[in-house]
Image: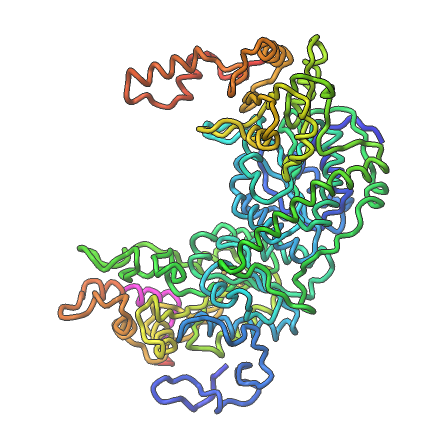
Amino acid sequence: MSEGVKFYQIGSRAVGNRLLDESLRTGQASPDRQNTLNSGHRACQGCGEALGARYVVDAAFRAAKGKLIAVNGTGCLEVFSTPYPESSWQLPWLHSLFANAASVASGVAAALKATGRDDIRVLAQGGDGATVDIGLAAVSGMFERNDDVLYVCYDNQAYMNTGVQRSGATPPAARTATTEAVGPRPGNLFGAGKDMPRIAMAHEISYVATATVAELHDLEAKVEKAMSLRGARYLHVLVPCPLGWGSAPADTIRLARLAQRSGLFPVYEAENGEVTSTLPIRGQVPVEDYLRPQKRFAHLFGDRPDTEVLSRLQLLADRNIARFGLLPEEVH
Amino acid sequence: MRQQVEGSRAIAQAVAWCRPAVVPAYPITPQTHIVEAVGAMAKEGTLSPCEYLTVESEFSAMSAAIGASATGARTYTATASQGLLFMAEALYNAAGLGLPIVMTVANRAIGAPINIWNDHSDSMSQRDAGWVQLYAEDNQAAVGLHVVAFRLAEELSVPVMVCVDGFVLTHAFEPIELPGQELVDAYLPPYHPRQLLDPEEPVTIGAMVGPEAFTEVRYLAHHQLLQANDRFPALAGEYAAVSGQRLSALSAYAVEGARTVVVALGSVCGTIKDAVDELDASIGVLALTLYRPFPAAAVRAALSGADHVIVLERAFAPGAGGVVSADVRAALAGLPARVSTVVAGLGGRAVTKASVQTLLAQAEEGRLGELSFLDLRTDLVDRELGRRDDVHRTGPHASHLLRETGVPSTRIG
């Protein structure tokens, strides 16, 4: 959507909202924005998930013309948004359990269909633990049945709500409370971890997309695209977590951007199991640039950087770049 | 209308007449015939509107039921045994959220060892999940209980489990008086939820509650469940008035003046009544239909004249003893009656009239202790215990016991 616009902010290369045509500006710039996830919640400073969720739910809410029901798995988003007796949610919202957001949402969609109210749309949300680990069967079942649900995974790459334990989405070498930076192989093991967007694609559902909180226009556009379709849809959003990543709250956007620009987190869209678009890497960075500001990777640096592990991580980024063609010649 | 029909089929038909709008289903023996029949009716359109969801697990079946019920749809599912345990987390959640889901449990044992046959271990394990539990004595009762269950669930906004003995009832063909659509429609009004996910009036359901109010929330759930002690008999009475089929929270058979009373749940009650009929002794039978909430006052009143109460249980608590017995003992506190627990019919072992009569003879002779196991093969057990003393690596019990018995079959009689 930013193609043809020549103005870039210094350093970031992101298109500034003020420089865009009014019709292209983020919905968050509007004084009439919905704030479906209202202020006053208890998220940490610099929480990527709170930012991502606000953009996602607001965009979905706009697309559904206010007729939207949200289902939430247990996790940070659920906990920080509903401290009894308060709630930040300005839309009908249901939290049941950790592992079942997808199947609860399937039930909501079925009820709407059976009672003739399927003008109301359904959004399910969960963290990476809820999605790729404990709730994977439910998510896969919802995909396979093609239930009319947009499922959004906010991926901060570990169980942050319980105190930063490893999940199936934790990257190799990352330190967590259950993959300590000790012993001959500090941090998380290589070869483990689930590539959930590609698992979703294998279900050949109508729409799968990845996004980060560094590219909020892109995120909004993907939510709009997803909401223009029916059936099972999946959106995987990388949301840096200052607490779990050991990063400065002010660096949340920067880290999300570096994750994409290093190639470690490929941003793309897929329809019916085929990749249809990618967000090209502009200004590629080595993985070190992304890893170094995060304390969870601190054991790779210091006096004697662990060049072997760093090069293995670079290989992962390179493989993503090759697989999705993230460095086309023309954007170098 | 009176029909010669399989229990599962009759239950499915009764459920369909209740017009559930969403039915998430997952197969597990012995409840499969029920969800198969409901699914066929949804697919052919005789049950409409109805969304029939073939989910990937029992956990998702109950989860989808939670979502559907909170969205204002009358919701039904069925399960058994391991399936009920697999949905345990969601059972507590459905009750905690106060969602009036109705579910059939086709009672079956829990492994290990894996066993597909009938006992009450499954539903008894979930007695504290916050659901109303109703136990059907026969298929005629099962049909009526399902219709009343929807009315009760929706009036109180609590989930209701209708427990039906697997195979013994679910797979039995017998003549059953079926109520018909018109009668059910007249009895069961459309679902008007007490809480609803509605964009016109957005609410947050399932928020976190801390120490400041958690006790109060749980108390309210208890209070709500207790209402069923009054409301189930009242609603069952209304059903009896329109259908002619009597249902009650507990039914006393020859209890008046009886010195010994056998308390039981489910299909075994029929056998016990038959056994008692042939004996020349002062023995009554108290069949419990309503088990949660536990109708303590009614049980106490019914058993107040008895000297000896025998609770015949199709489940037990390893390391403790009886499950139902604990409730019965609490209900009889301060009364002189002695309570014996008899664990019977585990994993499909037939509870025969002859076995029950032997048991009752022992009771009459004062030889029935606090806890006993009906028809326990003590020879097998003793040999296995002896082997345990001799060798450390005993291997799995099950294979030893089967080797001893010769054939892996259910012993009858």
The percent position of residue A160, horizontal first and vertical second, equals: 38, 62
How many labels sit on residues?
Answer: 0
Q: What sort of colour scheme is used for the picture?
A: rainbow
Q: Which stretch appears magenta?
A: A315-329
Query: For residue A323: magenta?
Result: yes
The C terminus of chain B appears in which quarter of the rendering? top right
At x 32%, y 61%, the residue is A171
Q: Is residue A42 left or right of residue B311?
A: left
Q: Quadrant of residue B345?
A: top right
Q: Residue furthest left?
A: A303
The percent position of residue A134, horizontal first and vertical second, equals: 45, 52
Q: Quadrant of residue A13?
A: bottom left
Main secondary structure of the magenta stretch: helix
The N terminus of chain B appears in which quarter of the rendering? top right
For residue A143, say whether it is visible. Answer: no
Q: Is residue B240 left or right of residue A30?
A: right
Query: For residue A94: magenta?
Result: no
Q: Is residue A197 left or right of residue A283?
A: right
Q: Up-down: is B80 above or below B151?
A: above
For residue B326, say whether it is visible. Answer: yes
The percent position of residue A37, horizontal first and vertical second, equals: 54, 72
Residue toward you, A25 or B17:
B17
Q: Up-down: is A71 above or below B265?
A: below
Residue toward you, A278 or B412:
B412
Q: Up-down: is B44 above or below B335?
A: below
The percent position of residue B172, horizontal first and vertical second, equals: 69, 24
Residue toward you, B347 or A213:
B347
Residue toward you, B150 or A328:
B150
Q: Quadrant of residue B349?
A: top right
At x 56%, y 59%, the residue is B206
